[in-house]
Image: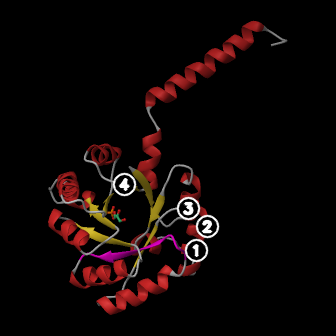
Amino acid sequence: MKIFLDTANIKEILQYAFVIDGVTTNPTLMSQEKTGYNIREHIAEIARIVNGPISVETMSQTAPEIVREAEELATISPNVVIKIPMNEAGLQAAKILSAKKIKTNVTLIFSANQAFLAAKAGATYASIFVGRLDDIGHDGIDVVRDTIEIYRQHDFSTELITASVRHPLHVINAAKAGSHVITIPPKVLSLMFRHNLTDAGLKKFCDDWAQLAKNQGPGL
Ligand code: G3P
């Protein structure tokens, strides 16, 4: 299972570059970068750090406009993947872009039927927002599980991205459900490295080593 980092923040991308396979951004994440940057240059900078897919969202509303915007965004780097909203215009555009060999990530997917249609349109990736489903009392991972079953059964090449991840248990459950990719916010990724027993164990090793050094006296 591939790990993408769900952020547009350069510092966070640099921090976790060693463990990630790609990056996903969205308009909200881009808007949190307060430095008054040039969006095109910002994406190019991410592409220089990460040698993998970088999702960038289109804001156009009609299929021809989405295609035009996607073609323009795709010139930034061969690794740019065009994030397209899950609706009729979006899937029309995804189909055209797939024929043009431009990679797409159909986003804001909340049901297995939507994920099925995204695959039929030839999307490279389909992003299921598990956290937002959980927020309204559904089980987002159920949608991941159903979609993986459909994709496997019918041999779709579309890769499922588990998105809207809120906690480390989402990562474990997405992996168990067979998700191809999970896009993880830096805060959740940082929690995955940690365990209190690891911290306590390391502290004890350090303390014991220091004690040993003291007992040996000078000359160690
Ligand atoms: O990449 C989009 C997605 O992960 C959004 O997450 O937390 O805003 O639901 P969230």
Amino acid marked by disc 4 = Ile
Query: Residue 80 at what x, y percent from top left?
Result: 48, 73
**Sequence order check, earlier mark of 4 and 3:** 3
Report, in whole angstroms, how far the alpha carbon at label 1 lies from the one at label 2: 6 Å
Query: Colour scheme used in the picture?
Result: secondary structure
Q: Nearer the viewer, mark 2 or mark 3?
A: 3
Q: Quadrant of the C terminus?
A: top right
Disc 4 is placed on an element classified as strand
Image point (24%, 61%), residue name: 132
Q: Which residue is mark 4?
A: 182
User: Height in image: 66 above or below 23?
Assistant: below
Image point (14%, 56%), residue name: 137
User: Height in image: 131 above or below 98?
Assistant: above
Q: Which residues are magenta?
A: 77-86
Report, in whole angstroms, how far the alpha carbon at label 2 lies from the one at label 4: 21 Å
Disc 3 is placed on an element classified as loop
* 141 left or right of 191 in image: left
Classed neighbour count for the residue bearing mark 4: other residues with Cα under 10 Å, few (<14), some (14–19), many (≥20): many
